[in-house]
Image: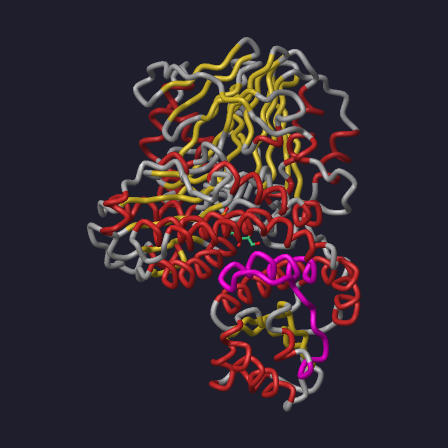
Amino acid sequence: MCGITGYTGKENALPILMEGLKKLEYRGYDSAGVAIFDEGNIKVIKTRGRLTVLEDKLNGLTISTTCGIGHTRWATHGEPTDENSHPHLSNNGRFAVVHNGIIENYRELKEKLTGKGYVFLSDTDTEVIAHLIDYYYNGDIVEALIKVRTKIRGSYALGILNSELPGEIIAARKDSPLIAGTSEDGNFIASDIPAILSYTRDYYIIGDDEIARIRPEGIEIFNSDYELVPKSPLRVDWSVESAEKCGYKHFMLKEIHEQPRALINTVSPRVSDDCGIDLEINVTPEFLTDINRIHIMACGSAAHVGQVGKYIIERLARIPVECDLASEFRYRFPILKKNDLCIVISQSGETADTLAALREAKRRGVRVLSIVNVVGSTIARESDEVLYTWAGPEIAVATTKAYSTQLSLVYLIAVHIAKTRGEISDSDARRLVSEIKELPEKLNQVLAKTAELQYLSSRFYNLRDIFFIGRGVDFAVALEGSLKLKEISYIRSEAYAAGELKHGTIALIEEGSLVIALVTQTALAEKMLGNIREVKARGARVLTIATQATAEAVSEASDYCLMLPCCYDMFTPSLTVAALQLFAYYIAAARGCDVDKPKNLAKSVTVE
Ligand code: F6R
């Protein structure tokens, strides 16, 4: 959600800013702009639309500059227009600001600043920052920014240029991601690592409430008392290639196929050759034994992982689990007790609602374990314990490999807690871990069904709505399959617990409707057969996804049956989801959709 880049150094800044913005396109945007130094003044070029439109505007210019900031905007306050695009200038042109986040009290600040003679040219919340900095500026921009921070409420990552100091970028953040990259040829700011990865692997995390001064010769980071904060740079351990498409048509397809490797990378460091589990977290067996209730909080697909987790943890560890959408949890006055454990799940580690839910849990004295993909992200830093999913960078907006690796960690957590509490024997735990270790190979077998899934997609790509049904963990996966389909193909789609159909939804089934029935739970296959017959009797076509163990019960009643390898019932979501991801992908591709950047969506949702 909004992308920020900045560069100061020896090289021509514009191509670096533009390349960085391209690498951040996956975050979602509707306008773009840059601010650069041009003969002692700040020049802003910005436009509504894609980066190609900005490129066209820049092509006509003959500016060579070694310092600038860039931005892709995902509109929140004010429509996507040229005026509302970032950067925003103070009225005297001294300060240019790019911003990711939301300034909650911008209305009252705008009123105050208007009263002092400032003229607003946009409808954005961001413009108040440019004018506020100008208002408090007394020759030292860091001092001004420290003051500004006491006046604004909300979330922000900021990149600022000051026309009095060409070659210098000031950056600051609160609850929105921002890093500072460093290399011999110059220094950078960026919302995410892919934006700087072609130039450097070394970066600093700018902490919440910190301010960074980025100059060609170095980076200084200050706290809110204007004291230098000593920091060592971190090193990115993944390659440029892992953030490129590598011959795949879309990042999403590449990331779907990366799942077996991502699962191995996530699981193998935590399990021994003889199938023992070591999660390497600082949680004692006594704590696990005493857990009263588990709360899982997340958004979107990560919340769907939580839904699967509820079934598995309750089944294996016999602990009550509540799975909450983070945006609901934070406002519903949840009942939390001392011996509860909160698990938050997030790919980006920056999702605003998930972060707020985490903070609420911590404020109430409950221990938080997070499952996060982005190393060093805010959620990872603020949790008591972190389990990283080693999925590598996920660029496509629709999550695939992050979802799968999150699932694998939920399985390990469930088995580990169940064993520690004596709900399953040591040998059962080892058998389950062995099942988890076999998932990458079985996942490869599902991915090898590409031709079958492509064929099925070609039959259904022009439908108006598609329904998903399932029971138990299949219902939880149905939610994810349905979300994947709707977000990238724009086909209306609903997921229902199959037993719930006849309580209302079945009214929507008509001649030719497509119902995707997930039937991987042996004990529930007969029940699903009943549901398949119900919808078929009303004219639906049924695509069943079953395992070799359940197919016999349901394949004859279905129009099509896609067969998955056998595995432990509770772990089938890892296989089912891959088939649903490919199905959604090929449908969206057949409809000519922008698969990696679906409309209205952003990769990292850093606002509420
Ligand atoms: C859907 C998708 C979103 C995210 C959600 C949470 O494909 O990617 O629903 O799962 O926005 O994001 P994270 O995991 O970054 O907290």
**In the displayed structure image, the side of residue 342 where residue 290 appears, left or right:** left
Instruction: Say if 243 sits above or below 323 in the image.
Output: above
Q: How is colour applied across the structure in the image?
A: secondary structure
Q: Could you say which is closer to the camera, residue 491 or residue 369? A: 369
**Quadrant of residue 518 within the rendered picture:** bottom right
**Residue at left 42%, top 33%?**
117
**Quadrant of residue 576 within the rendered picture:** bottom right
**Residue at left 47%, top 41%?**
271
Instruction: Say if 340 sits above or below 193 in the image.
Output: below
Residue pushed farthest top?
217
Image location of residue 331, percent across then percent down: 31, 57
Image location of residue 312, percent across then percent down: 42, 60
- Say if the magenta span includes residue 122: no
Question: Which quadrant of the rendered structure holds the N terminus?
Answer: top right
**Quadrant of residue 112 within the rendered picture:** top left
Q: Could you say which is closer to the camera, residue 400 or residue 364? A: 400
Which residue range is magenta in the image?
556-584
